[in-house]
Each structure stands twice: as structure tokens, then as C-alpha cells.
Amino acid sequence: MGPLTRTETLEVLASMGVEIPVNTKIPGDDLEKRLRAALDAAQEKARFSTPLDLKALPAWPSVLTNDISASSRPLLEAVKRGNMREAAHNYARGSRDTELFVDPFMDLRQTIMSLANVLDSGLAWCTIQDPEQQKSAINIRFLHVVELDRKTPAMVFLYRSITRPNAMEGARWVQHQVHHNPKKLDGLGLNISATQLEQKVLLKLFDMNAKLLPASFNPKKELYEEHYRATVLLPIGPLGPEAIGK
């Protein structure tokens, strides 16, 4: 999948509250820097020391680690972030449910919650796929979930972008996971829907966050994972006025 276009970058920034005129003369490199800074701020990266010391950080109590206290600290609740402005918007339209496939930044945050829900359900892998399930996907296998602080988990995983040229490779990986992953499926949706624009933002975020892992991190890969990359994902919330100003 190709990188974000200039128009797409402006759309994503606008969805984050960073309004820049469509006819702006700002160079493309500067726009990308602003997007990176916005995504970093949305994750509150500055609060944590990087690269992350995965050996020193405690594991987040979760089903993935078979921790019996998982029920008291579900990942889904831990990754939720919001503010009064969003709450007021949802109240005004009479629903707490988020409108999907309208706002790429909101879609991104919903997908992160869906990934947390996969882990809470005891599954260690999933796919993120376009709504028509025809164009592109991202395969994900979780490795660890560590605790940065009591309210901030960090999901560590392997991923691979799947498009039509490598679709068979992606399908073989899925079949391998179905047959070798010990967790039961029970009809749980392992396909998380995401538009191609959202997938591009996710891949941008995954590439950025790979640098949060120590250079020595070398996870064991399974069959069909030769080209998979390791990265980490933090909870993402709306930008505050100070971050938008910057």
C-alpha cells in the first residue's frame, strides 16, 4: 500500500483538529512532520522513556498472559481516551456510539479499541481489512502487552501489510493461525474493518512506533512471518488545544 498522499495527510490532520487550508503552500515534508508530531502527541509519547525497556516493564494483566486478575483491568477500558468536547458532540447527536468511516482519526481510535478487545477475548491474532474485504489488509499477531503505568498499556506485535500482489501469502498466514493458534474462535470477528485511508494511517503509526522498541528486540517469528515487522501501539486520544497550537 502506498504512503499517504498530500490530500490524505491534510484530511487526517483536519480530523485531528489541525486545520490547514487545502490550497496551502506548506511543503509536503513539513506536512508529514506535522502529522508525525500530531500522532506522537495523541499517544502522549513524551511521558515515557524510549526505547521501551521491555525486560524491565511489567506485563499488563491480561488473558494473553493468563493472568487471573485480567477481569479487573481489561485492555479495552485502558485504551479508551476522550474529552468533554467529544462527549458533548455524542450527547448532541443522541448517541454514544461513534460514527464509523466518517472521521479517519476517530476510526483509528476505534480500531485500537477493537485490537484491545481481541486481546481481552483471549485471541493472539487478527486481521484489519477494508470493509469490502477485497483491496487490502494488515495481519497482526500479538507478542506482549506491557504496562507503562497503571493506565497505559503498550501492545507489542508483529504485522504485515497485505495487498493483492501478496494476497496468497496473507491467506496462508491466516490459515496457519487458524490451525495452530490454540484459542477458540466462537464466532468472534477476527476481521476488523478499516478503510484504506485508515490503514495507511495505521501503517504510518506502526512504522513510527517501531522505533520505540529496543534495537536488540528480535522476536521469534512463525511460519509465513519472514517479512513481518515488530512494533508497539499505545492508547490514542484527542489532541488538546496546546498540542493543536504547536
Image (spheres, rainbow, N blue to C red):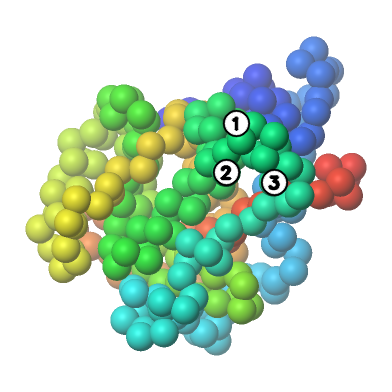
Residue 110: x and y, percent?
51, 46
Identity, as a three-letter code, of the amino acid under mark 3:
Ala
Marks 2 and 3 close (CB-CB < 8 Å): no
Identity, as a three-letter code, of the amino acid under mark 2:
Arg
Q: Could you say which disc has been placed on residue 87 in the image? A: 3
Mark-to-mark CA distance, 2 and 1: 15 Å
Identity, as a three-letter code, of the amino acid under mark 1:
Asp
Marks 3 and 1 close (CB-CB < 8 Å): no
Q: Is residue 219 above or below residue 179?
A: below
Q: Residue at x 40, y 58 (%)?
A: 117
Displayed quadrant of residue 36: top right
Displayed quadrant of residue 105: top right
Residue pointed to by mark 1 = 103
Q: Earlier in the sequence, mark 2 or mark 3?
A: 3
Asked whether residue 224 appears in the rendered view, the answer is yes
Residue 216: x and y, percent?
49, 73
Residue 132: x and y, percent?
31, 25
